[in-house]
């Protein structure tokens, strides 16, 4: 018995040391049965339709809610967090309307790539020391990383639903190592949001129907990243110049005042993504998009969805200088891009010029959804000037 306890203690010391060495900023342990409320809350999220088109959440409900349903052999879950706190206020770019605002996480190299290899290294050391089996997960597996991190004591799920820590505020990436090794769990963290509502009140699209609950269908992160179709009209103006993800709820969190800026070298941060000019982004064809976003999480959404987002920002820019770049996209091969270009143009040029463009373009337009965008934009312009 004594041997097994001392083995466990040694294993924990090894995990802490290796996590630090691999560049993680926090590590803690929990058990697979530590999130009993999560399955019901997840089921409610799906039943309310809050997952929108992310059908993979509904498809994996059982495995996602219960770690042992995902892997019956798991005995302990090690949760690791990496600080990605910015060294600047990410909200400053929101006032620069000719620029695109890319969320902080996506200004770095894809965190899946950065973290996965490091988690595997630590997992390898665990197996070498304790034997047994391990599995590593970052983001994409059906694992509820935030409630597990809270149960392990790394922080608490704030009212914006993300993990908040006293030390790192709201800027943490999470990853987990599932192991068959028995490890002593750490103590869960309490909620320290108190009566604060900063993250809820700042949301431009009112995506929080209640504290601790997010309707993803209204979240700018979902609308610009996960949503494959046209951005619903209701949200277009509110999106402003946010072209990939959104940090407003994170940036509003008062606990960020204790956070340190993360090492840019560790995250492989890209200065050219801090406030890229919309003109450059609107000009990206497929090859240029892929090459510009090599190694970036943005590559995942593909050129058409990205240019769609840049067009919404262009429409909100009030910058007539973007007119030519937008016009060039009226004839794009992608109906998704053409539809967004129609909306953007209708907001950048006078009514008469727009009507001229419309009569020429409508003759050639074969896609019903794009034709609808033209008709709607024409009607809105007439109404605005009536
Ligand atoms: C799907 C998903 C999204 C979706 C939906 C987000 C969501 N909140 O569910 C969208 C596309 C919108 C999204 C956006 C973002 N995401 Co995301 N996303 C995920 C993913 C893959 C699954 C999350 C999930 O399980 N959602 C389902 C819901 C039901 O679970 P939940 O959020 O934990 O909900 C809990 C609360 O609602 C709570 N609850 C419900 N009712 C009540 C009532 C009370 C009283 C209380 C106390 C609690 C409570 O219980 C629920 C279950 O635990 C995770 C990775 C992973 N595998 O975990 C990353 C993850 C959550 N995302 C992450 C990030 C960074 C983001 C963005 C910041 C990116 C950006 N800048 O644009 C935004 C933040 C938006 C936000 N406010 O959530 C990080 C968050 C890290 C952290 N510190 O928490 C994760 C963990 C990825 C990672 N590996 O680092 N994301």
Image: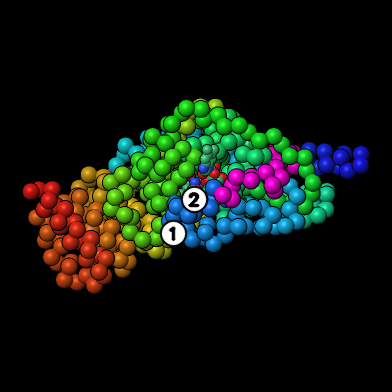
Q: Is residue 128 left or right of residue 26?
A: right
Residue 114 visible in the displayed image: no
Question: Residue at (49%, 61%) from the top-left corner?
Answer: 55
Q: What's the coloring here?
A: rainbow
Out of 128 and 79, give the one closest to the viewer.
79
Out of 323 and 315, give the one closest to the viewer.
315
The magenta segment: 15-40
Asked if ligand 1 lies within 8 A of label 1, the reply is no
According to the image, label 2 marks what residue?
45
Q: Is residue 243 left or right of residue 211?
A: left
Residue found at the very far right of the displayed protein: 2
Establish if 77 lies above or below 154. Answer: below
Out of 61 and 278, give the one closest to the viewer.
61
* Residue 53, disc: 1
- Horizontal and vertical percent position of residue 176: 65, 48
Question: Residue at (22%, 70%) from the top-left corner?
Answer: 365
Instruction: Verify whether residue 16 appears in magenta.
Output: yes
What is the spatial separation of the Cα atoms under label 1 and label 2, in whole angstroms?
A: 13 Å
Establish if 246 lies above or below 88. Answer: below
Q: Is residue 325 left or right of residue 249?
A: left
Q: Tell me which numbered mark, 1 or 2, is placed earlier along the sequence.
A: 2
Asked if ligand 1 lies within 8 A of label 2, the reply is yes
Question: Residue at (58%, 36%) from the top-left corner?
Answer: 156
Please identify the quarter of the rendering in which residue 328 is found: bottom left
Quadrant of the drawing holding the N terminus: top right
Q: Secondary structure at mark 1?
A: loop
- Horizontal and vertical percent position of residue 73: 75, 56
Q: Secondary structure at mark 2?
A: helix
């Amino acid at each position: 018995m004594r041997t097994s306890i001392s083995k466990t203690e040694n294993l924990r010391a090894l995990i802490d040391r290796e996590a630090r060495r691999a560049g993680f900023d926090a590590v803690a342990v929990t058990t697979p049965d530590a999130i009993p409320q999560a399955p019901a809350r997840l089921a409610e999220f799906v039943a309310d339709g809050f997952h929108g088109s992310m059908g993979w959440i509904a498809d994996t409900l059982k495995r996602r809610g219960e770690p042992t349903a995902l892997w019956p052999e798991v005995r302990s879950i090690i949760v690791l967090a990496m600080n990605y706190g910015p060294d600047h206020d990410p909200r400053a770019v929101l006032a620069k309307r000719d620029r695109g605002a890319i969320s902080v996480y996506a200004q770095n190299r894809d965190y899946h790539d950065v973290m996965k290899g490091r988690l595997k290294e630590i997992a390898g050391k665990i197996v070498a020391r304790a034997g047994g089996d391990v599995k590593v997960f970052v983001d994409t597996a059906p694992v509820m990383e935030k409630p597990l991190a809270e149960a392990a004591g790394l922080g608490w799920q704030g009212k914006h639903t993300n993990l908040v820590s006293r030390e790192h505020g709201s800027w943490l990436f999470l990853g987990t190592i599932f192991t068959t090794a028995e490890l002593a769990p750490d103590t869960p963290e309490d909620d320290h949001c108190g009566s604060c509502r900063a993250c809820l009140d700042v949301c431009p699209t009112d995506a929080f129907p209640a504290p601790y609950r997010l309707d993803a269908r209204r979240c700018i992160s979902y609308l610009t990243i996960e949503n494959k179709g046209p951005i619903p009209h209701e949200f277009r103006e509110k999106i402003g110049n946010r072209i990939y993800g959104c940090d407003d709820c994170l940036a509003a969190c008062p606990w960020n005042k204790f956070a340190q800026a993360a090492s840019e070298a560790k995250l492989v941060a890209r200065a050219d993504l801090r406030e890229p000019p919309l003109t450059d982004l609107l000009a990206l064809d497929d090859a240029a998009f892929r090459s510009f976003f090599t190694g970036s999480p943005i590559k995942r959404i593909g050129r058409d969805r990205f240019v769609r987002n840049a067009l919404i920002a262009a429409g909100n820019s009030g910058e007539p200088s973007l007119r030519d770049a937008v016009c060039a996209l009226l004839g794009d091969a992608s109906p998704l891009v053409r539809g967004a270009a129609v909306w953007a143009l209708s907001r950048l040029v006078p009514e008469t010029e727009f009507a001229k463009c419309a009569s020429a373009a409508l003759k050639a337009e074969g896609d019903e959804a794009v034709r609808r965008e033209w008709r709607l934009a024409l009607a809105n312009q007439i109404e605005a000037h009536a």
